[in-house]
Image (cartoon, grey):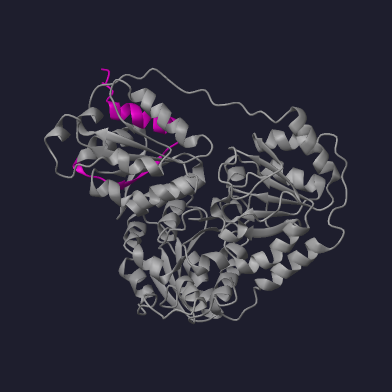
């Protein structure tokens, strides 16, 4: 007996074919057929406590398996609860399929309860939005997956009418052919080849586009062949092991790091922007170099339409073949013989020391020292994220995940849950400020229900530390940034996990050690002094 395929089945099977094995959300009656279709296709649906957190769990799974994330939400309030994480996916270049229920086109003409134009809501924060139709279900499904995964990656929204999901549909094997990888050729490549040959102080900046291309090996071979020091954006950390002698670490939001990096940029005679997307950077990186004074070669996934920086040569092509073509016939040479690279590298090491007795830097240093080298980390937005992104050494891509383009709070805890679900054999730790942790503390119940054992580390100073710092810097009255101390360790225990409050490195070391041996999640509340980030970020 042949089972009739529904439109929802056609969509779900296309998602399975794209590598999806997990979906997250909170169902309503309008998406029950969709959830059933996902399960039948081999995609497990996971119930979260909030749609926004569900999306971040899905993103974390994407960082583990490379498949598009799946967020499922019912119509109206369910769909709107996911707005933040969808906007984050758009700015952080995360492929995500946002599947929302909706009433049928005919019904919405006379039925207004919970009805709104969801496509208009999602259109500005997605790469595309579709309304599923049974006759075109396979075409729409393939378009959605293809658009989400093509450079630059991002979210695609599908509104799924209630009866359409259950309507019979056919499957014909429709697939868009992927674009082939081609390198630059002709006069542009010849000019870039000449610039590289003449450079004596080259400097590379590696970004999230390079990570999406999986270009780490090609980049490592390239910088080693030409002795080129490199900086990464926060999301590109680990694209080349950060223990590499040419690595200058991450950059993006830290004025302290920029004190050492900007002089090197000014001294460079060739800047190579390699898969560099400036959406992660603070305003101090706008026009960080003068193309009238410095040669700038840009190789990226898309043409430069942001105008945050400019280049003398801009090549829109895949990195690996283009870098190979640039290297062809080049002779290795010494670079940065004036000592400026060593000065910058030494200065960064002193700016972010690992030997502080306590405070936020001490917490990060101790955690990095205790946790295994293969630990996977997530970071919430706040002052701690800036410090963490400078101090946390990554040995592989996506070893530290965070909201970097949108900088949204409340992402670290659900990201850690999703990452641990996808990679249960790897140690996983999240770093949250106390305010961000309070936003999503209910997802501790999800960690317990999933029987997962990530470590949730909370910086406790009872303040929106980064905003309070900016408030003081502008000599404004302290308003709306401080709140009460709460027992975060007790919250962990209340939801069925472990909980510890620590006030020094020895206590933190003991808590981390016990957490790694536990089969339950652990909340570690690290109490630090207010003002602990002053002069450190």
The image shows residue 304 at horizontal and vertical percentages of 59, 41
Quadrant hosting residue 197: top right
Quadrant hosting residue 260: bottom right
Whether residue 61 is visible: no
Q: Is residue 2 left or right of residue 469?
A: left
**How many numbered marks does the figure carry?**
0
Whether residue 434 is visible: yes
Of residues 427 and 340, the one drawn nearer to the viewer in this rendering: 340
The image shows residue 340 at horizontal and vertical percentages of 80, 63
* Residue under the point 53% across and 39% down: 152
Is 361 above or below relative to 218? below
Q: Quarter holding the C terminus? A: bottom right
Q: Which residues are magenta?
A: 1-29
* Residue under the point 52% across and 64% down: 385
Q: Quarter holding the N terminus? A: top left
Q: Is residue 372 left or right of residue 465?
A: right
* Residue under the point 50% across and 42% down: 65
Is 167 above or below relative to 462? above
The image shows residue 40 at horizontal and vertical percentages of 31, 33
The image shows residue 109 at horizontal and vertical percentages of 15, 33
Q: Does the magenta-highlighted stretch encompass residue 19?
A: yes
* Residue under the point 68% across and 44% down: 311
Q: Is residue 241 left or right of residue 496?
A: right
Quadrant hosting residue 433: bottom left
In the image, farthest residue toward the front = 292
Of residues 252 and 499, the one drawn nearer to the viewer in this rendering: 252
Q: Does the magenta-highlighted stretch encompass residue 53?
A: no
Q: Is residue 267 left or right of residue 320?
A: right
């Amino acid at each position: 007996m042949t089972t009739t395929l529904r439109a929802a089945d056609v969509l779900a099977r296309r998602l399975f074919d794209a590598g999806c094995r997990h979906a997250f959300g909170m169902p309503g009656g309008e998406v029950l057929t969709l959830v059933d279709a996902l399960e039948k296709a081999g995609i497990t649906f996971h119930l979260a406590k909030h749609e926004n957190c569900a999306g971040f769990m899905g993103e974390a799974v994407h960082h583990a398996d490379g498949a598009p994330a799946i967020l499922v939400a019912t119509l109206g309030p369910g769909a709107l609860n996911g707005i933040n994480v969808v906007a984050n996916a758009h700015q952080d270049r995360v492929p995500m399929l946002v599947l929302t229920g909706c009433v049928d086109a005919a019904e919405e003409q006379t039925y207004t309860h919970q009805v709104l134009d969801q496509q208009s809501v999602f259109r500005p924060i997605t790469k595309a939005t579709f309304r599923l139709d049974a006759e075109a279900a396979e075409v729409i499904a393939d378009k959605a997956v293809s658009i989400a995964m093509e450079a630059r990656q991002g979210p695609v929204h599908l509104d799924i009418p209630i009866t359409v999901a259950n309507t019979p549909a056919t499957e014909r094997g429709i697939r868009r052919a992927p674009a082939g990888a081609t390198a630059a050729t002709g006069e542009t490549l010849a000019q870039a080849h000449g610039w590289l040959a003449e450079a004596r102080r080259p400097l590379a900046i590696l970004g999230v586009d390079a990570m999406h291309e999986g270009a780490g090996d090609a980049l490592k071979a390239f910088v080693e062949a030409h002795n080129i020091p490199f900086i990464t954006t926060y999301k590109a950390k680990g694209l080349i092991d950060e223990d590499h002698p040419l690595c200058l670490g991450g950059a993006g939001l830290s004025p302290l790091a920029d004190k050492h990096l900007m002089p090197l940029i000014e001294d460079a005679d060739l800047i190579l922007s390699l898969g560099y997307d400036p959406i992660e950077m603070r305003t101090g990186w706008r026009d960080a170099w003068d193309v009238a004074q410095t040669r700038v070669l840009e190789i990226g996934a898309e043409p430069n339409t942001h105008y945050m920086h400019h280049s003398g040569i801009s090549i829109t092509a895949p990195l690996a073949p283009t870098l190979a073509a640039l290297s062809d016939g080049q002779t290795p040479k010494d670079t940065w013989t004036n000592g400026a690279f060593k000065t910058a590298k030494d200065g960064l090491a002193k700016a972010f020391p690992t030997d502080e007795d306590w405070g936020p830097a001490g917490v990060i240093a101790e955690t990095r020292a205790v946790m295994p080298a293969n630990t996977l980390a997530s970071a919430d937005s706040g002052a701690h994220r800036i410090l963490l992104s400078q101090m946390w050494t990554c040995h592989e891509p996506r070893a530290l995940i965070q909201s970097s383009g949108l900088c949204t709070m409340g992402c670290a805890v659900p990201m850690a849950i999703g990452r641990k679900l996808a990679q249960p054999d790897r140690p996983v730790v999240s770093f949250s400020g106390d305010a961000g942790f309070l936003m999503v503390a209910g997802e501790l119940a999800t960690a317990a229900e999933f029987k997962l054992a990530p470590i949730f580390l909370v910086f406790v100073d009872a303040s929106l530390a980064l905003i309070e710092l900016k408030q003081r810097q502008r000599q404004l009255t302290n308003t709306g940034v401080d709140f009460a101390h709460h027992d975060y360790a007790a919250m962990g225990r209340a939801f069925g996990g472990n909980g510890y409050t620590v006030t020094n490195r020895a206590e933190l070391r003991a808590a981390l050690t016990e957490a790694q041996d536990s089969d339950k999640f652990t909340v570690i509340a690290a109490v630090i002094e207010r003002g602990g980030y002053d002069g450190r970020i």
